[in-house]
């Protein structure tokens, strides 16, 4: 058994065949957590999860690139957006209502993203503060709901680490992990997990994976993105097996051990 701890079958890329992809995954003993990026994709993740008794779950949250800041214009991703406008003002009550579903197992994905950013120093400072404010609101929501968090972090590990240090009792995973050795130790000190996906075939993170204890590793696809080189086209949960194979090679242990431990890690963190 495997658990794809971070997928996006709630995105527009699967508008026509999400149920088919899920059935294929479940038939191969692969469970799925669909992760929200804004209100509409979070709502869709919940709707999908509630169609299945077992093996399909949801996370709800506002991704930093979808936060309305008034400071930067983000290019739209047709694979993702399903319903509404791209930028959103965070409404805690709406997300809290979504999280009442028993199928919601986390708040996410939330965090910092500085890839699309303002060009001036003054605007960049405001930009960072707005992301931080909403991140803390979502951390507090997760605490109230007793749910773990799924963190997104691009070009911002130091800011994420400093923010989390000021928050007590954080549970969660830094998904699509690409931090350096110092970042890794900081997250380990906080007891966080690390999510790895097809990016490990494109970036050399072998030494980082060797450093992280197996009981802190989760596997994911981040589908429809980051398709492993063994496949072509759109990614899907079925391909998480390639991530397991790669981690097994790096850790010099067998596939079955990685599958068993990462599955138990996900079950423990998300209480599924």
Image: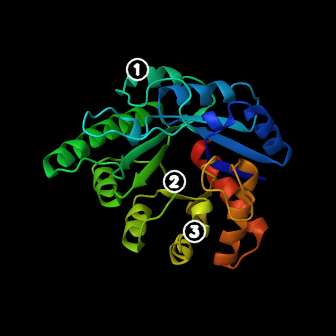
**10 Å crowding of disc 3: few (<14), some (14-19), many (20+):** few
Question: Which residue appears farthest toward the right when viewing the image?
Answer: 27
Tell me: 178 left or right of 183: right
- Relative to the observer, which residue lies in front, 262 or 247? 247
In the picture shown, does residue 172 fall above or below 84?
below
Q: CA distance from mark 3 to mark 1?
A: 39 Å
Is the C-beta separation of discs 3 and 1 under 8 Å? no
Dividing the picture into quarters, in which one does residue 74 lie? Answer: top left
Residue named by callout 3: 202
- The picture places residue 145, in percent across and down from the top left corner, at 47, 31
Q: Is residue 154 visible?
A: yes
**Residue 248 is drawn in which quadrant?**
bottom right
Q: Residue at x 49, y 20 (%)?
A: 97
The spot of residue 239 in percent (x, y) is 73, 55
How far apart, in angstroms, are the residues tagged by discs 2 and 3?
Answer: 16 Å
At 58% from the left and 39% from the top, the residue drawn is 79
Secondary structure beneath label 3: loop
Cα–Cα gap, marks 1 and 2: 25 Å
CB atoms of marks 2 and 3 within 8 Å:
no
Q: Is residue 254 above or below residue 8?
A: below
Position of 137 compared to 108: left or right? left
Q: Earlier in the sequence, mark 2 or mark 3?
A: 2
**Label 1 belongs to which residue?**
93
Q: Is residue 79 left or right of residue 179?
A: right
- Horizontal side of 246 relative to 173 (left or right) equals right
Q: Which of the numbered marks, if any, corresponds to residue 175?
A: 2
User: Looking at the rendered structure, which numbered label has been put on residue 133?
Assistant: none
* SS at mark 1 in the image: helix
Give the answer, above or below, for where 119 lies relative to 89: below
């Amino acid at each position: 058994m495997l658990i794809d701890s971070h997928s996006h079958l709630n995105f527009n890329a699967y508008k026509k065949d999400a149920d088919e992809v899920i059935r294929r995954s479940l038939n191969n003993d692969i469970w799925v957590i669909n992760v929200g990026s804004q209100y509409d994709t979070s709502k869709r993740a919940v709707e999908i999860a509630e169609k299945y008794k077992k093996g399909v779950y949801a996370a709800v949250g506002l991704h930093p690139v979808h936060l309305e800041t008034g400071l930067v214009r983000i290019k739209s991703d047709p694979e993702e957006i399903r319903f509404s406008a791209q930028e959103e003002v965070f409404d805690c009550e709406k997300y809290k209502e979504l999280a009442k579903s028993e199928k919601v197992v986390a708040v996410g994905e939330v965090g910092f993203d500085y890839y699309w950013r303002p060009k001036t120093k003054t605007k960049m400072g405001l930009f960072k503060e707005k992301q931080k404010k909403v991140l803390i609101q979502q951390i507090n929501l997760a605490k109230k709901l007793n749910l773990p968090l799924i963190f997104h972090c691009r070009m911002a590990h130091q800011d994420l680490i400093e923010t989390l240090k000021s928050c007590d009792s954080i549970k969660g995973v830094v998904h699509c992990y690409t931090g350096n050795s110092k970042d890794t130790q900081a997250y380990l000190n906080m007891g966080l997990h690390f999510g790895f996906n097809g990016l490990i075939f494109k970036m050399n993170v072998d030494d980082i994976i060797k450093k992280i204890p197996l009981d802190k590793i989760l596997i994911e696809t981040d589908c429809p993105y980051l398709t492993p080189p063994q496949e072509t086209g759109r990614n899907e949960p079925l391909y998480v097996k390639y991530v397991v194979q790669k981690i097994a090679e790096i850790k010099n242990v067998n596939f079955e051990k990685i599958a068993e431990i990462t599955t138990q890690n996900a079950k423990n963190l998300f209480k599924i």
